[in-house]
């Protein structure tokens, strides 16, 4: 089998707000080209869930948050999403 020189995928830290939680996690995206923008990934009609890694989940009403290595977030519950400014 021929070795492929695949470019590494990149991660973008994103904040999602639902009616009950703020979810912050890393979305994995292609390095460039087709669907390399976060908005492209979120607006795909054939995808109902967004996979996230390194996730922080906090209730909007306050209280203890939690961390998860991996979750899938239903796009149906997302009310607002934006990149987290790291700098």
Image: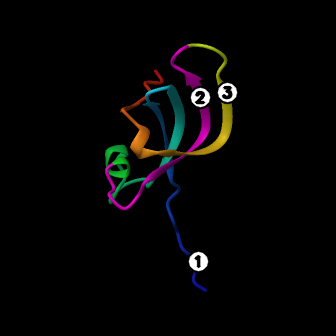
Point out which mark residue 57 bears: 2
Quote the CA–CA distance across marks 2 and 1: 39 Å
Judged from the image, the secondary structure of the residue bearing numbered disc 2 is strand
Crowdedness near tag 3: few (<14), some (14–19) or many (≥20) residues, C-alpha within 10 Å:
few
Rendering coords of residue 12 (x, y %): 47, 39
Q: Is residue 42 left or right of residue 20?
A: left
Quote the CA–CA distance across marks 2 and 3: 5 Å
Residue 13 higher or lower than 72, as above or below: above
Point out which mark residue 3 bears: 1
Which residues lie in the magenta part? 43-61
Farthest residue toward the top? 62
Q: Earlier in the sequence, mark 1 or mark 3?
A: 1
**Which residue in the protein does label 3 denote?**
66
Crowdedness near tag 2: few (<14), some (14–19) or many (≥20) residues, C-alpha within 10 Å:
some
Rendering coords of residue 53 (x, y %): 60, 43
Quote the CA–CA distance across marks 1 and 3: 40 Å
Judged from the image, the secondary structure of the residue bearing numbered disc 3 is strand
Q: Quadrant of residue 18?
A: top left
Task: Tell me which residue sits at (61%, 86%) in the image.
Answer: 1
Labels 2 & 3 near each other (Cβ < 8 A): yes
């Amino acid at each position: 089998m021929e070795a492929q020189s695949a470019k590494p995928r990149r991660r973008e830290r994103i904040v999602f707000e639902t009616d009950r939680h703020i979810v912050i996690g890393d979305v994995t995206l292609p390095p460039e080209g087709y669907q390399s923008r976060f908005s492209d990934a979120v607006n795909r009609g054939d995808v109902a869930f967004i996979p996230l890694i390194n996730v922080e989940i906090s209730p909007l009403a306050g209280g203890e948050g939690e961390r998860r290595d991996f979750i899938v977030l239903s796009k149906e519950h997302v009310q607002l999403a934006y990149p987290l400014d790291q700098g």
